[in-house]
């Protein structure tokens, strides 16, 4: 082996030792770039989770409001039917036993509508929970894939810049 080849081998060993010691200038640049990117991604994840929580709260409030409104309308309707029954069927009327049946018949369409609305809301709420679960699984899978991709890209970029820096050092020493 010639003196030049021995010198090159020694320089390559020195570069590898520096590589192991983390003395690359480019590492700071690569780390700063990827740390900044990961901070933005983290912020985006937090915003997405916050928006999901706010949506679930809004949905819960809307369902609660709907139940309260139906209960108020139901109570009001029952009072109206009862008052109407008292007007049309006074206490001393021989048709007073018929009043209860008329009240039940008068409230049947309203009760049916409320029952139907409650069933629809229960199905909607259940579907929404299933959707949120599936969406959460999908995002978890996506973020896991994204994290592995970012780690690989960061590693590849660090390797590339280290090779460039090693090449520049070899050229500078020559």
Image (cartoon, helix red, strand yellow):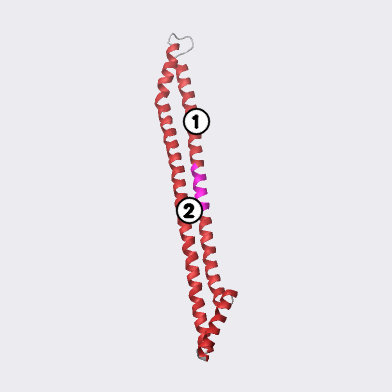
Q: Horizontal and vertical percent for residue 35?
A: 55, 67
In which image quadrant can residue 17 be found?
Answer: bottom right
Q: What residue does disc 1 label?
A: 71
| Residue 24 visible in the current orientation | no
Element under disc 2? helix
Q: What residue does disc 2 label?
A: 140
Q: In this view, does 39 lie above or below 7?
A: above
Q: In this picture, which residue range is highlighted in magenta? A: 48-59
Q: Horizontal and vertical percent for residue 99?
A: 44, 15
Q: State the residue in front, 33 or 105.
A: 33
Element under disc 1? helix
Q: How crowded is mark 2: few (under 14 residues within 10 Å), some or many (20 or more)?
A: few
- Residue, x 45% and y 36% (percent of image)? 122
Mark 2 and mark 1: Cα distance apart in space: 40 Å
Q: Is residue 116 above or below residue 139?
A: above
Q: Is residue 127 magenta?
A: no
- Residue, x 53% and y 91% (percent of image)? 3
- Residue, x 46% and y 59% (percent of image)? 145
């Amino acid at each position: 082996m010639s003196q030049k080849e021995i010198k090159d081998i020694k320089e390559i060993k020195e570069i590898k030792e520096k590589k192991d010691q983390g003395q690359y200038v480019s590492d700071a640049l690569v780390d700063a770039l990827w740390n900044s990117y990961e901070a933005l991604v983290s912020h985006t994840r937090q915003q997405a989770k916050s928006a999901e929580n706010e949506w679930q709260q809004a949905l819960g409030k809307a369902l609660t409001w709907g139940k309260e409104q139906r209960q108020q309308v139901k109570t009001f309707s029952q009072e109206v039917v009862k008052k109407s029954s008292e007007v049309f069927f006074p206490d001393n009327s021989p048709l007073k036993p018929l009043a209860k049946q008329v009240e039940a018949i008068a409230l049947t369409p309203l009760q049916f509508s409320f029952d139907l609305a409650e069933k629809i809301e229960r199905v909607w709420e259940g579907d929404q929970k299933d959707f949120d679960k599936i969406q959460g699984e999908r995002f978890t899978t996506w973020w896991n894939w994204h994290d592995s991709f970012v780690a690989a890209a960061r590693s590849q970029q660090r390797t590339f810049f280290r090779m460039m820096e090693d090449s520049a050092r070899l050229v500078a020493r020559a």
